[in-house]
Amino acid sequence: MDSFYKLSGLRCNPAKCQLFCAGIPKEEMLTISEFTEFPLGTLPVRYLGVPLITGKLTRQDCKVLVDKITQKLRSWRSKLLSYAGKIQLISTVITSTLQYWLNIFLLPQFVIKEVGRLCNEFLWDSAEDGSRKKGVMAWDKLSIPKKEGGLGIRNFGVWNKACVLRHLWEILTLGGSIWVAWISRYRLKGRSIWELSVGSAGTLIWKRLLKCKAIAYPFVSGNGSNTLWQGEQMKQFSMSRVWNDIREKKPEVQWWRLVWAKEIIPKHGLILWLAIHGRLVTQDKLLAWGENVSGCCVLCPGGVESRDHLMIYCSYSLSVLKLCMKSLSPPDVGDWEATVAWCAREWKKKAARSRLCRVLWCTAVSYIWRERCSRMYRTKVIRDPAMLVKLIREEVTYRVYEDPALQLELDSIQ
Ligand SMILES: [Zn+2]
């Protein structure tokens, strides 16, 4: 080691080195370890936190990643976060924690599923309405774009494929990296990657990459620097675009603007989203689950509490909507689904009137639900429709503060 240092000027730092031995007795390993001051390491070797392996990723290999995500989610549990806040954390922090691994490996299905399960549990745990996990939806239904009815969280499995396809793209376009040069020389040997069979020699990661050819095949044409993605040049590989192209698309839902439009306040949009998906934990559901509740609406004197009752038939809610939106409130068109369809159709435009109707209605729906939860689980403070409308108007006024067109519209229905 000293000779190496004298020749190269590079001194080994024992704190950053580990000793790996095979085929020698343990005593000998310990002697070498003592002599070199390098601690004994265990396989797999990690580099920048990622295991350096050529075979199949096992649960043990991925444990460090799953533990890291579990730890992050646990640290946020103690905080009082809204659904919107939780979704934001999953979309940003958890996705970026995963990103490093997703760029390198095609993660096994069990890891993708486990991370999805952890995020799903975190999302519904200690929910704002005190329902705890009762409203859980399948993660696959949540991790789809907002316009298709989801929460806009990317599906980790499909995103992983898009990340790995970047390597394939580099090979196809003969990117300038040393890795591509090595692959060209030792793996391709003058052939195109399309000619190689999935079963050809190489590490498991290489074989997985070859398997991904089938995903890219329908989108790729040309070769070398003239390789095209869907008939177009892609100067820089766009993972978002590739992800969007390779994923299974669902039809657009008509109501997405009611929940996700720019003017909507996210925490209220989420309540409306839950209502649309039939995930508000109303008393008819609690009764069906055998919970000890009366089943009676806490907002009005009569009626069994269900989503449709709360949002459409309840006299309290009707008063709130009438007071809040005046002649703009949705007419009686039948049940909740018909009302949502009516609102989505009538208020789909970009005009200020449509935007104001969307934000007022969404905020009112959310406030009605919050009033119901507040009466059921928290305080005994009872707000009459006029008081609730005052709060709704205040919040919407604050929201449209920097939008003169919306302000004008709001003033016109005072
Ligand atoms: Zn009622």
Image (cartoon, rainbow, N blue to C red):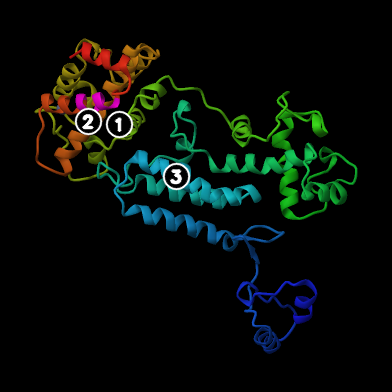
Residue located beneath label 1 in the image: 268
> Percent x, y for residue 395?
23, 28
- Mark 1 or mark 3, earlier in chain: 3
Foreground of the two, 17 or 187 = 17
The span shown in magenta is 393-399
| Amino acid type at image mark 1 | His
Residue 296 occupies quadrant:
top left
Q: Quadrant of residue 204?
A: bottom right
Does the CB distance between marks 3 and 2 fall below 8 Å?
A: no
Q: Is residue 14 above or below residue 67?
A: below
Residue position marked by numbered label 2 in the rendering: 367
In the image, what residue type sits under mark 2? Tyr
Magenta stretch encompasses residue 69 = no
* Count of all numbered marks drawn on residues in the image: 3
Under circle 2, the secondary element is: helix
How far is the residue under mark 3 from the one under mark 2? 25 Å
Per the image, the residue denoted by label 3 is 90
In the rendered structure, which disc, 3 or 2, sits on the residue that comes first in sequence?
A: 3
239 vs 83, left or right, is right
Residue drawn at (52%, 47%), measured in percent from left and top? 96
